[in-house]
Image (cartoon, rainbow, N blue to C red):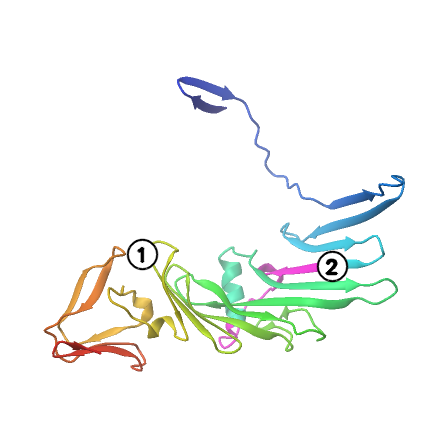
Amino acid sequence: IRFEKVKDTYLYGVYEMLTGRVDVISQEVVKEASQEDPTKLLQTTTTYAYNGNNFLQSITTALPNGTTKVKSLKYANDFSISTPLANDTAAVALKALNDAYRASELVEEIDYLTLPGQTQTVINASLITYRDFGNGRVLPYYLCSLPPGAALTPASATAQNFIADTDYITKTTLKEYDVEGRVLTQFDDKRNYVATHYFNDLSVPAATFANATARQAVFEGFEMPTSFGLATIGTAFGFATGWTGQKAISLQDNGTNLKLVSSSNSYELSTNNGNRY
């Protein structure tokens, strides 16, 4: 029984919840009639196929002129990897996704085209490889695409390895995430870096940086999540409540030879006798 209150009146109704059944769309047929002669029709038929877990596996569209388009989808559960090699990070991540019941994560998407009287051709393909960043954060790492005209062998797997076509080009690398799984640092195939810092507990960017990683960017009132690997050198640092609600590091004017350094020690913010650098 479902209850609902409208002002001072309680309303109720009976509803049924069906279990143990799955309803999916198997086919759509669209018929377009000519305005001059409604008996003349152009028909487009779209057929949907699903895998054993009812994930959408392919979409086949038959156009009126005889052209056929097919979109093929592969998910984490399409790759059965039982004992991944440690150096195959994509295989390790796929096993972790399946073990964590995240089998529906998309891995590969391929678009095929068959013109009338011709053989099927791959016109587009994309691939997502994942990486285990620790603490349950199995997230996308490489975003790849197939160059025009390249032949394609769909991704597959053995018990130990994930196998992807070597023609794929990595277009974006999602290099670093924070503890909540938000992207901190990414770069494209031309090594253009973009970094983002977020507000505490909100998926809203507090600052965005170009041509720098998230580890290489600091600013006044900078929050100190441990994922950035920053460390302090010196003792005259302040850790007052920051503007985003967490402890924020600040350099005290009376500090001498203070440094806020990254794990690589390549980038630092320092102060000497009250002068900040």
Q: Nearer the viewer, residue 73 or 122?
A: 122
Relative height, residue 65 to residue 17 (above, below): below
Q: CA distance from mark 1 to mark 2?
A: 43 Å
Name the outermost residue toward the bottom.
266
80 drawn magenta: yes
- Residue 190 x %, y %: 52, 78
Q: Earlier in the sequence, mark 1 or mark 2?
A: 2
- Please identify the quarter of the rendering in which residue 159 is found: bottom right
Relative height, residue 37 to residue 101 (above, below): above
Q: Nearer the viewer, residue 113 or 20?
A: 113
Residue identified by numbered label 2 = 70
| Relative horizontal placement of residue 11, taking residue 28 as reference (left or right) | left
- Residue 60 x %, y %: 75, 55
| Relative horizontal placement of residue 242, taking residue 200 as reference (left or right) | left
237 drawn magenta: no
Name the outermost residue toward the left.
254
Q: Residue at x 39, y 17 (%)?
A: 8
Q: Which residues are magenta?
A: 70-89
- Residue 178 x %, y %: 37, 64
Amino acid residing under circle 1: Asn
Relative height, residue 23 to residue 260 (above, below): above
Name the outermost residue toward the top.
9
